[in-house]
Image (spheres, rainbow, N blue to C red):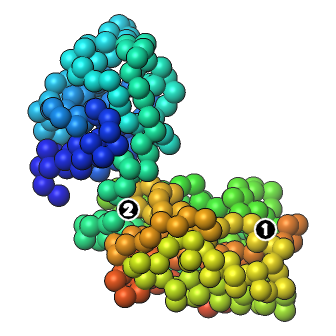
Amino acid sequence: MGSLGQRLNPYTKIARNLGVDAVGLVPGPNFTRAVRRPFMSHERPFLLVIQADGPPAALVPNLELRSWDLVGFEGAVFDWRDQDGYDAAFDALLVHLQIKSLAVEGQIMRVFVHHALKRAQPDLEIIDGEAAISGPRVIKTDDDIRALRAAIAISERALARVLNDVCLGQTEKEIEQALIQALFAEGADGQAFSPIVAAGDGSARPHAKARADYAVKAGDALLLDFGARKDGFCADITRTVFLDHVSDEGRQVYDTVLRANRKGLEVTRAGVTAHAIDDAVIGVLESSPYADRIRTKTGHGLGRDVHEAPYIMRGNHVVLEAGTVFTNEPGLYKIGDFGVRIEDDVLVTADGCDVLTTFPTDLQVLPCRNSSSRAS
């Protein structure tokens, strides 16, 4: 995607469009997209400032200087050491920049960095420019799509491995551990997020944590929501299966969620709004006998972050452009009993969509054996 200077140009334009003197990036997805190297977000402030008019500057922890050299940054660099503290570096940075206003990533910049900026220059106007700053990430490049496809393929191979080996009597935690091991065995650089592995009544909690004291049993719904991270990009997949057998209610709920999922794919194309997609998907759930089990919106953008813009929900009238990737993940959750969620990763195209996930969405009932017979 060109030189570092070319990759910073969009942020110069964003600063001008927002009417501020500069944009500030901290380690995270926008920062990584710009400099093409990941840096940690920890107790040490790290700040890249791109001016509307003028060269960029950076505040860099001294221990990161040799790594920062690899970025090819040609602006002024202000470093600091742990034993000296960072306030003097902030003072020097702002004296150098001579700016009056700064747009920052409201969902990423931490409060202590904000406070350090204000100590250095109390009259500095700091605004939340999250939506504009993250905007360039919404439309994926060909390289982005290739990385997403790779992360998804890894995830689907891992899922096939795990479902093939699920046994009655395994705990949720054991299945989670097997899933994590399978992700790395299939080539993941890391996890997109901590997996959700939930069975029985746990599957009715949208963000459940795997339990070490719950052994899966015949008739359970087993929900797995997870993803690999590959080349900086995240997969996010959910499949719900049933173990040994499925009740009539379970079958009907699954069919309802699957129809909602497919409705979302049917209405997706460039030019449609996030509101319209969610309205169509949730409309299927609302018209079913299970409307009281709706707990979540349809989905969210996907890329370097597992949750990013656009958010697929009623009231969000942003128009989706070709190249946008989002999750289509309707679900129904009967608290205390079971839940079903089916999640695909979807690329918006000019005349429809490309479903990047390929793992089957038809109802699966796994013919599980008991864990005690695994060795036999």
Q: CA distance from mark 1 to mark 2?
A: 31 Å
Q: For the residue labelled by badge 2, is the local secondary structure a helix, a strand or a loop?
A: loop
Callout 1 secondary element: helix
Query: Can you see residue 298?
Result: yes
Of 20 and 8, the residue lying toward us: 20
Q: Residue furthest right?
A: 336
Left or right: 164 in relation to 204: left
Amino acid type of the residue tagged 2 in the rendering: Val
Q: Position of residue 340 (x, y in %)?
A: 72, 76
Residue 243 rendering spot, x and y as whole percentages: 74, 82
Q: Is 139 positioned to the left or the right of 281 in the image?
A: left
Residue bearing the label numbered 1: 204
Quarter of the image that includes the C terminus: bottom right
Q: Residue at x 69, y 74 (%)?
A: 331
Residue at 23%, 22% in the rendered image:
97
**Position of 88 relative to 222 (above/below):** above
Point out residue 21 in the picture as x, y percentages from the top left corner.
28, 32
> Residue pushed farthest front?
19
Rate crowding at label 2 as few (under 14), some (14 to 19) or many (20 or more) other CA atoms within 10 Å.
many
Residue under label 2: 138
Q: Nearer the viewer, residue 249 or 92?
A: 92
Residue drawn at point x = 28 percent, y = 18 percent: 94
Name the quadrant of the N terminus: bottom left
x then y, percent, for residue 150: 35, 71
Residue in view at x 24 percent, y 20 percent: 98
Hey, which quadrant is residue 81 in on the image?
A: top left
What amino acid type should be assigned to the residue bearing mark 1? Ala
Which mark is on residue 104?
Answer: none
Q: Decide which of tag 1 and tag 2 comes sooner along the chain.
A: 2
Q: Is residue 112 above or below residue 20?
A: above
